[in-house]
Image (cartoon, helix red, strand yellow):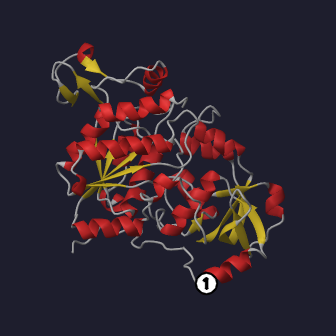
Amino acid sequence: MSELIKPHGGQLVDRVVTTGEEWEETVARARELKKIALNARTLSDLELLAVGAFSPLEGFMGKKDYEGVVYGMRLSSGPLWTLPITLAVSKEEAGELQEGEDVALLDSTGEPVGLLFLEEKFGYDKKEEAWNVYKTDEDRHPGVEYLYRRGDTLLGGKVKLMRREPLLPRFETYRLDPKETREVFQRRGWRTVVGFQTRNPIHRSHEYLQKCALELMDGLLIHPLVGKTKLDDIPSEVRLRCYEVLVEHYFPKERVLLSVFPGAMRYAGPREAVFHALVRKNYGCTHFIVGRDAAGVGGYYGPYDAWDLFGRFGREELDITPLFFSETFYCRRCDAVASTKTCPHNGDDHVTLSGTRVRELLGQGEALPEEFTRPEVSEVLGEWSRNGQ
């Protein structure tokens, strides 16, 4: 058996309550505790903390870790970490809680899904977090807008997960925890695995990047994000169907694993690109594809700012190799997908479509050009559009 890459921090966190007597006791105890309702993002964060996707974190960040990440992109114990993972409540809610007590965490129906072992509660400066993490304090930025809507007090402490939020039935087959993806990689004998993060339907440029990387690797993890995204992003169930037909028709199945990542999108640009790489290391990836404007939104970041941020960290502390790809396009004269590194022709010969243009074509009932996406993917998107989106 090949030895897999170690998780970030050296050990995969497991904060899931197993079935049986422990589970029954925990559920009964949760019903007697003070309670906090979680929203869609914090529910997904709770799950990802518990299953080890956010290793070495064992819970929502306390003050030292929060400040270390916001201002220096490091946990208080030293490891690299680029995004705060926090639980915010109102001052009124916080006033009802005491440090040192346990708190039940509820889903949208009011049922307990986990426990928070409350170690500390503290205030924070939202504008400071916005500027440091998102590089803007404009509430037009979806990450900043979410930040401003949150409560004014953060709760820090380890968590336990009793029950997961159900995903759509189609997703459950692809819902693999880090422990499970690692088992698949080991079973298949993959020593090198490249991860691909996406929140959009795969088009020809994405396919090109993945296949270039797969030429050098034992396996590819296509890991679409299916948690909370912007309202105008294409729904996750439509995106998953696009990935299914692409893998079915255009990839060697024995060298690809399609799995869903139930996390929320932060749109934090360079910081989130590094975060996505560290998380995929926990899932067992040795390499990670970083394209143009990774995790960006609305022109808030330069097209290759993420590359610069990756360059600030040493190989040992990242311990996952970023694969940098510049913008790609279909060149009519080359009759292939290419980039400025491989294509000598000018822009008149290049086919590139923005997300806005894709939605316009779909809204007009037109098929997407085959130079942009495979016909099977175009049909999935067209069907979604014809059914009223």
Say left or right for 259 vs 67: left
Q: Secondary structure at mark 1?
A: helix
- Image coords of residue 356 (percent x, y): 47, 24
* Quadrant into which the N terminus falls: bottom left
- Image coords of residue 122 (percent x, y): 72, 60
- Image coords of residue 231 (percent x, y): 58, 36
* Quadrant into which the C terminus falls: top right
Residue appearing at x 19%, y 30% in the figure? 341
Residue sticking out furthest to the bottom? 21
- Residue annotated with mark 1: 22
Mark 1 burial class by Cα count in 10 Å: few <14, some 14-19, many 20+: few
Residue appearing at x 45%, y 31% in the figure? 383
Question: Quick check: can you spot residue 76?
Answer: no
Residue 350 position by quadrant: top left
Residue 216 against residue 360 in the figure, above or below: below
Say left or right for 301 vs 124: left
- Is 326 or 353 nearer to us in this picture? 353
- Is 71 or 5 nearer to us in this picture? 5
Question: Quick check: can you spot residue 120?
Answer: yes
Say left or right for 91 vs 285: right
Residue 40 against residue 185 in the figure, above or below: above
Residue 127 position by quadrant: top right
- Image coords of residue 305 (percent x, y): 40, 37
**Amino acid type assigned to the residue bearing label 1 in the image:** Glu
Q: How many marks?
A: 1
- Is 163 or 103 nearer to us in this picture? 163
Residue appearing at x 62%, y 40% in the figure? 144
Residue appearing at x 54%, y 73% in the figure? 15
- Is 244 or 197 nearer to us in this picture? 244
